[in-house]
Image (spheres, grey):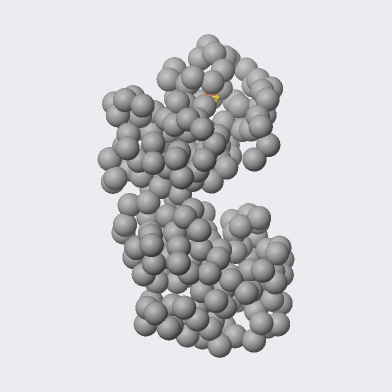
Amino acid sequence: MDGGVARRIVDALLRQHPGADTELHFRTPFELLVATMLSAQSTDARVNLVTPALFARYPDARRLAEAVPEDLEALIVSTGFFRQKTRALLGMAAQLVEHHGGEVPASMDALTALPGVGRKTANVVLGHALGVPGFPVDRHVLRVATRLGLASGTDPVKVEAQVCAALPASLWTQASDALILHGRRVCRPTTPLCSRCAARTDCRYPPATADAPRRVRTPRR
Ligand code: SF4
């Protein structure tokens, strides 16, 4: 997409969702990495309920790497997939200690080499906690970005590349946050509220004149 149009769309979404940011609570890159890993198949609100006790007990990678699995499971059980997440958290913490002095590395390659850390999680941490531009693509970003014509296709990596090519790096993280909020509040999967959409004149999905909630077909992801 033309960079000027992409910028116009993102500016409109940022005006509609001022202060768009991750809704996960964190104080350090380590806490955001843990919270983001826990948010898989869960909600930010649910994760924010369990992380205060979790971070009080395991404030850094060294402490988490020494955790007893059953103790960790008990703290995160309500986020779902708790055994799988416990294995990933313990593996991640051990590798941070072994290879990175206990710190979270500020590079995509190093982050995605950690157990349980995919590209989306890495981009969240890079963009929000480490000052490195990142464009996380979740299901909301995938849906809204393609409806708006910012990208095409269903491959998150390709969508990330297309949007990043159309926007300055300084906007990537904010743009992702705005697209996520827009997808949650306005551009819903089956009933997008097009009449409330600040970017509707540039939208390629339903007619731009749509002035009422529409029921549309969306492939399951
Ligand atoms: S006009 Fe409708 S479909 Fe297009 S981005 Fe806005 S809410 Fe989504």
| Image location of residue 157, percent across then percent down | 46, 45
Q: Position of residue 119 (x, y in %)?
A: 47, 55
In which quadrant is the C terminus drawn?
A: top right
Q: Is residue 37 left or right of residue 129?
A: right
Would you identify the image quadrant in which residue 87 lies? Answer: bottom right
Q: Is residue 22 above or below residue 187?
A: below
User: How many numbered discs?
Assistant: 0
Where does the image place residue 32, in percent across and percent down from the top left?
47, 65
Quarter that holds the N terminus: top left
Where 110 sits versus 156, above or below?
A: below
Task: Please report the residue visible at 54 percent of the width from the left and 82 percent of the height from the top.
Answer: 64
**Residue at left offset 45%, top offset 71%:** 30
User: Of residues 99 and 61, which is closer to you in this image?
Assistant: 99
Q: Residue at x 51, y 32 (%)?
A: 153
Residue at 68% over, 25% down: 217
Residue 40: name its quadrant. Answer: bottom right
The location of residue 220, given as percent across then percent down, is 68, 36
Query: Considering depth in this image, is 105 or 25 the residue closer to the camera?
Result: 105
Query: Is residue 183 something one can see in this rendering?
Result: yes
Residue 26 in view of the camera? no
